[in-house]
Image: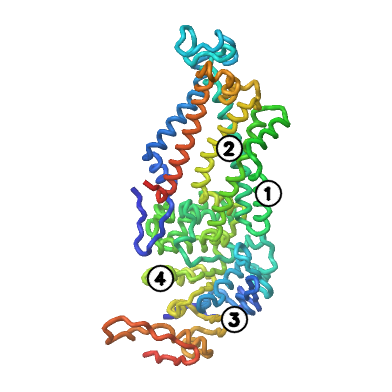
Amino acid sequence: MPNETSPAQGSDAEAILSVRDLVVTFGSFTAVNGTSFDLFPGETLAVVGESGSGKSVTALSIMRLVELGTRGKIEQGEILFRRDNGEVVDLVGLSENEMREVRGNDISMIFQEPLTSLNPVYTVGNQVAEAVQLHQGVDKAEGMARALEMFQQVRIPDPEQRLEQFPHEMSGGMRQRVMIAMALSCDPRVLIADEPTTALDVTIQAQILGLMRDLRQTTGAAVMIITHDMGVVAEVADRVVVMNQAEIVEQGDVYDLFENPRERYTQALLAAVPRLGSMTGLDEPAPFDLVEMETVEMKQVDS
Amino acid sequence: MTGLFVNDVEVEAVAPPGREALRLFFRNRAAVFGLILLIFMILMTYLGPSLYDQDPSRIIAIPLEGPGTEDIPAFGTDYLGRDVLAGVVNGGDTTLRVSLVATLIMVLIGVSIGAIAGFYGGRVDTLLMRFTEVFQVMPGLLFALVIVTLFEPAWWKVAIAIGVVLWPSLARLTRAEFLRLRNLEFVKAAQAIGTSDFRIMFRVLLPNAMPPLIVATTLGMGAAILFEAALAFLGLGDPNDVSWGYLIGQNRGSVLGGWWTVTFPGLAIFTTVLSFSLIGDGLQDAFNPKLRGR
């Protein structure tokens, strides 16, 4: 259920992040084709779409990580970020050094795989402290103190002991909490979460989503959550951007979109969510019907 | 014992951290034997000369007296009548110093070049790997010979020559490890918090690449000792430094008439190289228990 207390997006609010006409290519393949959307302070924006629709590439482009290692290229477009002091910078034009200052400090990112997102050779406390040390110019002890504070904030039990543990000594849910603690340790103004719950089981998913919702309220960071799970969207998002085949199909308020999806693709995406109870009366589990975009009919949601 | 406890997700096998590896290492009998051999050789090299205070270059008796002869030191005398035991005891210092410095040079060049090539990839990688191949295709011993003969022999020049010959294999290994690790999620996560390339290479990737590199370095130490011995045998070391290889080279004419003159320095080389091999194998097993085919 969408959060009623979520800060309303004021019409006069200025976007903290504006992506304008972004085109990203990998060789001859266009992964993102002319995407434009805004992210406003304090809101949660969900970017949804199937695998390969360009969601993650969009996120990596905002961090300017798409060019590193993966050989992607931002061909055109602007990624306008509004700094604390109101100054607007185009992230696409920043040098690698300037970008490094932005990463982790102004814009943070958490990844899909909590199992592999932490460095196996350092204790988790060390890794969170490292992020703090990088941006705040503090020493190790202060970094660790901040890490402890963050562990308490993301509700890791026994935070003092947990600081000393290695990633492999923690469960997936705990590791994702550590990732969130690391991402939020420098009070970023934008948090990008790339499928933060996909690798977790359902009960842990609910915990992590609840945690992210609470943290957004306490820190005031704008959150951009990437997912293919419509349940997650309904749970946390204020607004939704639907992507398909490198382009934005539809964007709008989460209530409007769920109640009245305009585009055929959005209708198909919503119809593809299995319904609870649809197997009632069957002796054995059966595969769900395939949803075809051409023939999709919206299911009636019982009130 | 701390196991891999996991309650909500299945976890992939994780390489045991240092402590666990150390425990496995000490359970491996061959490796512990290697370690004991190495400690013995080190003690002999650094405490031996003061316990057995004899000048290895002084002529003390008639030449080529075998061990067990009355009034003759335990390992006999060489072709000039010098004390073989004193030579063995004093020869370790040069051998170990040269091979240690050579190994350091190998690690410095090999890891840097491999790390940069593996991390940046693309054209940088191609260029650095071609450069590495140039060194790799040169016959090592001949190349070291040329370097040493071009300059006045000194122990550190020998060390540089050996290091320059040995680094390519380590560079290739480092590159391979970095290529494997570079695309893992935690590298992206480190970049996402604003870590610099240098820190990612040496603080994020390198510690994860350590296990195979430690093994290769240990084995490289053995190779460096053999190289040093070969160069000294050919008389290309510093003639003022006694080393095991130099002793064998000096006495190569008397192999038939005085087996002890070459056997004891040879045994010293053999023992030291063996100890490094056993330790290297032990480390390999400890870091990667899956590979243990027993």
**In the rendered image, which residue does mark 4 sit on?**
A205
Looking at the rendered structure, whether the residues under marks 1 and 2 are on a common chain is answered as: yes
Kindly report the distance in space between the C-alpha atoms of the residues bearing marks 1 and 4: 50 Å
SS under mark 1: helix
Q: Quadrant of residue A232?
A: bottom left
Residue A87 in view (yes/no): no
* Residue in view at x 67 percent, y 27 percent: B154
Residue kind at label 2, given as amino acid type: Thr
Using the image, name the chain to which the residue with label 4 belongs.
Answer: A
**In the rendered image, which residue does mark 2 sit on?**
B103
Kindly report the distance in space between the C-alpha atoms of the residues bearing marks 3 and 2: 55 Å
Looking at the rendered structure, whether the residues under marks 3 and 1 are on a common chain is answered as: no
Residue B236 at what x, y percent from top left? 66, 27
Residue B195 at what x, y percent from top left? 59, 57
Residue kind at label 1, given as amino acid type: Phe
Residue kind at label 3, given as amino acid type: Glu
Q: Quadrant of residue B61?
A: top right
Q: Nearer the viewer, residue B262 or A195?
A: B262
SS under mark 4: helix
**In the rendered image, which residue does mark 1 sit on?**
B131
SS under mark 3: strand
